[in-house]
Amino acid sequence: MIWEELDRRLADLDRQHLRRQRKEVDSPAGPAIMVGGRSLLSFCSNDYLGLAQHPEIVEALVAGARRWGAGSAASALAGGHLRPHEELEQALARFVGMPRALTFATGYLANLAVTPALVGRGDAVFADRLNHASLIDAAQASRAEHRRYPHNDMAALESLLAGSSARRKLILTDAVFSMDGDLAPLDVLFALAERYDAWLVVDDAHGFGVLGEDGRGSLSHFGLPASPRIVLMGTLGKAAGVAGAFVAGDGRMIEWMINSARPYIFTTAPAPALACALLKSLELIEAGSARRAHLHHLVARLRGSLAPLAAGRGWRLADSSTAIQPLVVGENRTVLELAAALEADGLRVPAIRPPTVPRDTARLRISLSAAHNEADVDALVASLSRAR
Ligand SMILES: *Cc1c(COP(=O)(O)O)cnc(C)c1O
């Protein structure tokens, strides 16, 4: 039967220690989660500022639903673009210092919209090898030539750009790499985009809310000038604690996306109450310097104790100053055993395996949040030092 092949494929995944399983969480997302009747200290979430449970955001969501209903009932162009959506877009544009912003239901959709809207057949996309899956899919969907350069290798990128005769060029990168936590050199990337007249599309899923002045994100962190060639994507389900995403940049670029981007046009607009919650979240992000300082303090504390431990075990603590602190252990089986040992100790850290990361670089992806405290970080280090 046609489905028998699926049994074989799933068995293959089991053999390679690559089968993924979800575990039902029976509590709100936060540092302490309930799984299978046990309370676990969690290092899995992207809620970097601890806003996902913030009472004022929850209240704004509830009030938004009372005022505007449960759903938007239509795509944005067909009548689903309600006042809260418009207000959110204006607030986002102002916050990131761009002329205009456009909101999406998810970051995955936002990425799928941007690259195919800007380049196509006969054009070229220059992409970091460690880009997020949604950027890879977007480059492929665009039908432009997809040239990938070694991670953060600016010399390699420049030689690809110099050798390209493509009509239009687009440089595509994560700002904070999602499985490594390190930053793209956005200043160098911008200089190259200027020199070769390319678009620079930056996915700031993990920088928005966390990095830069008042959490404005990675562009602000690097002090990049406003430029019509920069297209910024930010997600709203991570540091912002809610859901959705936005693209910000030049007014003509946004206008063109509204008129051409299929992942924008052919989908129902997000619930307006989400936009109400996000307006509150944006205020809290802007006023969140204490949260960011606490997060950065926890990052330094973790690295201070984890670096010597990792060196002694033959693990590699990634070179990251962000909330994403991967501990690369290598083999799939080893990382699963380590994650299981932590779980037995009452801690949840996700084991990340190929194809999410390159072969032989399986890792624990530790992510910290301002909702953690020092004792949480110390408990993680203590458990790792007990694990073998
Ligand atoms: C999470 C993530 C996305 C997708 O965003 P969603 O809103 O979760 O769909 C895109 N890019 C990067 C780098 C991400 O980490």
Image (cartoon, rainbow, N blue to C red):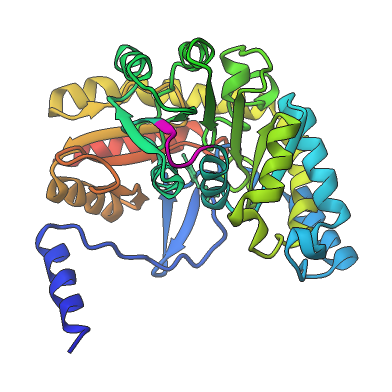
**Is 285 situated left or right of 156 in this image?**
right
Q: Nearer the viewer, residue 286 or 341?
A: 286
Image coords of residue 334 (percent x, y): 14, 46
Residue 121 within the magenta-colored segment of the rendering: yes
Please report the bounds of the magenta region as a residue range: 119-125
- 6 vs 349, left or right, is left
Q: Quadrant of the N terminus?
A: bottom left
Query: Residue 280, located in which quarter of the rendered image?
Result: top right
What predominant SS class does the magenta segment belong to?
loop
Report whether residue 46 is seen: yes
x, y percent for residue 306: 30, 26
Q: How many marks?
A: 0
Q: Residue furthest toward the bottom?
A: 1
Question: Considering only vertical position in the picture, is 27 above or below 332?
Answer: below
**Could you tell me if residue 287 is visible in this image?**
no
**Does 148 appear above or below 162?**
below
Quadrant of the image occupied by residue 159: top left
Q: Residue at x 59, y 37 (%)?
A: 233
